[in-house]
Image (cartoon, helix red, strand yellow):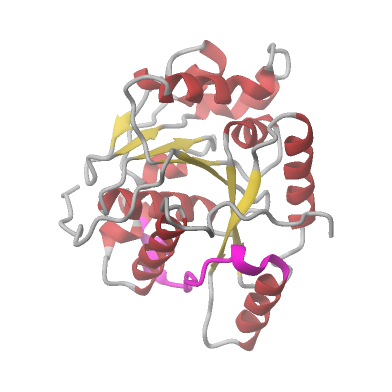
Amino acid sequence: MHVLNVRQESWPRPAATRVLTVANQKGGVGKTTSAVNIAAALAMHGLRVLLLDLDPQGNASTALGIEHTVGTPSIYDVLLGGRPLAEVGQQADFAPTLTCIPATLDLAGADIELTSQVAREYRLQRALTAYLATDAEFDYVLIDCPPSLGLLTLNALVAAREVLIPIQCEYYALEGLAQLLNTVDLVTSHLNPELKVTTVLLTMYDSRTRLADQVADEVRRHFGPLVLEPVIPRNVRVSEAPGFGQTVITYDAGSRGAIGYVQAAREIAERGAPNSDSEGAPVSTSE
């Protein structure tokens, strides 16, 4: 994969490392696609990014062109073998400031294997804290979760300070979110008091349908300023890119999908700038 020369500007660095878990237990909402493209866009604009692939399918690793065949050192070895994150990270070919911790199929049974482990909810948090305490300097850590609320997602929520929720502009967009928001509340109350929902991203937006506008309006009413202004349009390039082991930004930088993700990533970076007061506004999850 060739290196793209798209870094026309450097986006602002946050005052401290931002750790965001990209979560939605509903499948097919663009969660992994959002995680990898936002990570790529941030890295291509001068920011140091760590992406942790916590989904046994390893789709985030695939999209970044990262080796993740069975036996590859991976997040499984970190969670269940105590291996340091520094030993399993791989650099993305197209962006030298983007590091990926891959997932392999070994992770498929991790939810069950973690059940018997001591401090099972804190495995990822402890590994990440130890990694960030070394010379590893990252502006952003993005954690891609599986489409479930099991122990892998729980580890991601305990390790993060922020939750980014992708929501598709289709029927039942908010259905099931109550369960995720309730889980975030429980994690905040019992395991990680720093956790809060800070970012909501509208995906799969079809400007030709009235439904998409209705859903977008409903999401903005519910989450208010947490919703990013850019929306991710339905775009065939977004779907094609992973098949070539790429993000849409490296696959077709001029496509509507790539432009949408770059704009969304820029707003995330601007919200996280030290002089910004918009980053980290909490959302009420009591509805």
Region in magenta: 222-241
The residue most toward the front is: 275
Left or right position of 252 against 27: left
Residue 26 at what x, y percent from top left?
67, 53
> Depth check: 185 or 270 in front?
270
The quadrant in which the C terminus is found is bottom right
- In percent of the image, x 26 and y 40: which residue is there? 97
Residue 237 at what x, y percent from top left?
36, 67
The residue most toward the right is: 287
> Depth check: 74 or 51 in front?
51
Residue 246 at what x, y percent from top left?
31, 51
- Say above or below: 32 vs 267: above
Residue 82 at what x, y percent from top left?
51, 12
Q: Is 84 included in the stretch rendered in magenta?
A: no
Left or right position of 180 against 27: right
- In percent of the image, x 72 and y 29: which residue is there? 191
> Depth check: 10 or 44 in front?
10
> Depth check: 165 or 222 in front?
222
Q: How many marks?
A: 0
Q: Is 239 included in the stretch rendered in magenta?
A: yes
- In percent of the image, x 15 and y 57: which residue is there? 5
